[in-house]
Image (spheres, coloured by chain):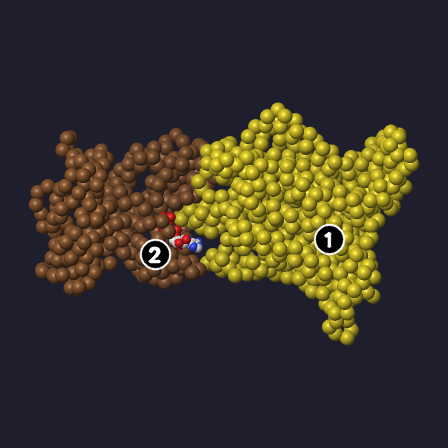
Chain colours: A yellow, B brown
Amino acid sequence: MSARFRSWMLFSVIALFLGAFLLWPLAHVFRKALFDSNGFTVFYFKALVTDPLQIRAIGTSLFIAVMVTIGCVIVALPPAWLVARRTFPGKNMISALMLVPLILPPFVGAVGMKILFARSGSLSTLLMHMGIVSGPIDWLGQFPLVGIVVMEVMHLFPILYLNLVAALANIDPSLEEAAGNLGASPWRVFKRISLPLAGPGLFGGIVLVFIWSFTELGTPLVFGYRRVLPVMIYDSVSEVGTNPMGYAQVTLVLIISALGFWVSKYISGNRGNVATLGRLSVSTKEKALSLPGMLATYTLFGIVLFVATLPHISVILVSCGKRWFLTVLPEEFTLAFFGRALSMELTQTALFNSLFLSICAATLDVFMGFSIAWLCVRSRIRGGDLLDTLAMLPLAVPGIVIAFGYLGCFSGHFPNTYLDPRFNPMLLLIASYSIRRLPYIVRAIHAGLQQVSSAYEDAAANLGATPLRIIRRITLPLVAANLLAGAILCFAFSMLEVADSIILAQTERFYPITKAIYALMDILENGVNVAAALGVWAMALLGAAMLWASCLLGKKMGQMFHAS
Amino acid sequence: MHSNNSSMIEVRNIAKRFGSVTALDNIRFSVSRGELFFLLGPSGCGKTTMLRILAGLETQDKGSILYNGKDVAELPPHKRGAPMVFQNYALWPHMSVYENVAFGLVESKTPKKEIVARVNQALEQVNLFGMGNRMPNQLSGGQQQRVVLARALVMNPHTVLLDEPLSNLDAKLRSEMREEIEALHKNTDITFIYVTHDQIEALSLADRMAMMDNGKICAIGTPSALYHRPPSLFCATFLGEANALQGTVLNVVGNMVITDTAIGKIKAVYQGNTPTIGTSVNCIIRPENIRIDGAGDNSAQAIILSSRMTGATTTLLLDVNGTILRAVMLNEYGSNPAAGTMVTAVFKATDTIVVTS
Ligand SMILES: Nc1ncnc2c1ncn2[C@@H]1O[C@H](COP(=O)(O)OP(=O)(O)OP(=O)(O)O)[C@@H](O)[C@H]1O
Ligand SMILES: [Mg+2]
């Protein structure tokens, strides 16, 4: 079996999967948007771009996305550079803490933040006590956009941070030293050498954040801000049988996201292919910090981490606080809610379901992500780029759309099978989780592969390694950091997946953790507290997973990039 | 040991383009078993590309490659058995020196004991014994280069492809490694194809060499033949130093040519096709073949412009009616002529070669 044939086999398997679980449901959505009983029509699109309300919503969504992206770059860049280029005591732990924002579903965090910043919440009370303001202020009601942007930046900046650290760690430090040696100050070196070389990683991260915040549903929903495109789509989903406007909106989101993606691809494409070559320098890339530098560093990380963990803190307070109204902190504390959050059958099943689903999805994603990136970057088959483009499509597809597509498509065609979410949603949940996270893992591995010179693989082939052995012994270990980063992201976000969980899992037996939290908020008298407690358990679990992965990553990085 | 003359590697009419760049154009040569064959040419002339095609890492647009008489078009890189010493090293950064060197043996499922022994032997061969546990980024450039060499040699291959293997070594190490390669060449049956832009390396080591320019081979032969009887002006000037005098062919007598040049009539020899009378040619004279005493077939009055001692030899710049000739002579204490002296530059007809291109 020739290598080419094998590549095509792999290509076909993945294309088939994406065709069935991505294209087909999307085609279903498109068909509903572009065809009514009289055949083809652009009526709904016309209605969309002539309605000032819709235009406002689109503009607001774009504004949020741009602000969130800028915010994330500003927040992520200094810590990423410090971690990649300097040593200081406690670096590994601090670096791991940077991932903490990822371990909380934004909608759960938003619930906590709502309590902190509400009219009767902690901030108002605190400011009133200090005599700075005279009466309670409804912060989120006054500045809803600021709230949304800050909330999303706090949740999303770690994505950019991870990307940046991985990209910076892959740069041969002698390139930076050469620039310093030729008279460039550290800042100039960063601007002229490190940043351009980190290009693929940085751009990859920026597009992720942009499109994510552009299609983010949970945060504005919980904050009650309905004049953004994703929420309007969500609203039209509920009247989907009668009003095809939602489908037109989805199509528009798709176009804008694709455009953003294409622009970034064009820009990073122009920068050329950045590969580290085989001539490794003897230098170590990490320098020790001076004392003032160290103090500044700790202050920076302290501020970033404090602000980023505010939602977590607030959720923890809700989970163990009794009677919290017009006081800065709850008046009484209890651990009872934690026990209840674990003793209920609903929550136990939900935890198990989520773990199972997320591990399956992450495994599937690592396999597909690596295959796609490899087919695209390394094998010379024609369809590689096509597959890559296809794998990026989910970036532009909000979870609700996929979930709704599944519901419409599969329930109708395969009733009472494992493809029918009403019968058993597990398979479709794995499919939707993995497809939703596929772009991130492909991006991460893609960037890694691009930065690994193909000369390493050539050398292995030249010394007798078969293509499969080359992948196992050379390619995989060299992109392990990126692979693992991708897998962690995939696992964590699958655990936190909201929209498709809520739509697809319809019986309690199949509830994932997010849906259980959602359900808890309604059904119990202290539901919010139990829900928060379950959120805290989930946080702890995810935190442990991430900590472990990050330790592994640190060791791997040590092996790969400097002396061990 | 050149056990037989069968050609180990045959390269037939290879052509390769990268977009609009013609990297290789109709390359043809053959290398016999155990031969140390050089590809010599300036940067960018296509040497690396040729090696990569031999290793199967690049596919030619046209032509074919034969190993041992068999076309290897269908053989993927990992089955060609011709390890390469990469110009940019390509040492795997996630593997130790030992693991790097052992890589190929592991792939060929060699027993573990044998791997240990052979890797250690290979490391010893390149003066790196005891460094097996280091990571590549803990090695100097020269050490990395030697690891790459060991990584290839440990395979006991039929052919080794070397892409500028000594380019990053200091002078002493370089000559040591050169001797090492020479010894390997003498004591084994390995066929070497050795790419370099360093003519000294090629002249001192090669059994035969091919000179490349701009994707084409412009000459193939032994170092001595190419040096003393260069087939073209490029060949003459790229390989060592050469004085080139432009002239017109006046007459051809036997294997002698009389040409008319700026410094007068010159008697020279030619190779290959007989030059046509009246055509424009170049007369090549190596600097060490010009003397300033005695008599010869060709002579001209000259003024010494400068005289520079460079150790064993002295380089003179001679002005003959405005034409500058470079002459090199062995040093003898107290006897070097000073600048400004009138002398007669003399050289033999058999040291003067006419080239038409
Ligand atoms: N992958 C490629 N894509 C495009 N052009 C290439 C590629 N590889 C080589 N070339 C071009 O082909 C020509 C020959 O390149 P090659 O690397 O073989 O040169 P070389 O003789 O090894 O040079 P050097 O001595 O500098 O290593 C050069 O003009 C080079 O720019
Ligand atoms: Mg080269």
Q: Residue at x 77, y 75 (%)?
A: A38
Q: Quadrant of residue A555?
A: top right
Q: Is label 2's Cβ within 8 Å of ligand 1?
A: yes
Q: What label sits on residue A340 in the rendered view?
A: none
2 and 1 marks in contact (CB < 8 Å): no
Farthest residue to the bottom: give it.
Answer: A38
> Would you place residue B352 above or below residue A116 in this image?
below
User: Is residue B167 shown left or right of residue A535?
Assistant: left
Q: Is residue A273 left or right of residue A126?
A: left
Secondary structure beneath label 2:
loop
Nearest to the observer: residue B85 or residue B271: B271
What residue lies at 54% left-to-right and 55% top-to-bottom? A376
Placement of A341 over or under A414, stated as above or below = above
Q: Give the labeled residue for mark 2.
A: B215
Which chain is home to disc 1?
A: A
Q: Identify the residue at image location x=70%, y=35%.
A: A304
Residue type at mark 1 is Leu
Residue A7 in sight: yes
Determine which quarter of the picture holds residue A93: top right
Q: Residue at x 13, y 61 (%)?
A: B250
The numbered disc on residue A62 is 1
- Front-lying residue, B326 or A469: B326
- Return the x and y of residue A112 as percentages of the image width and height: 81, 39
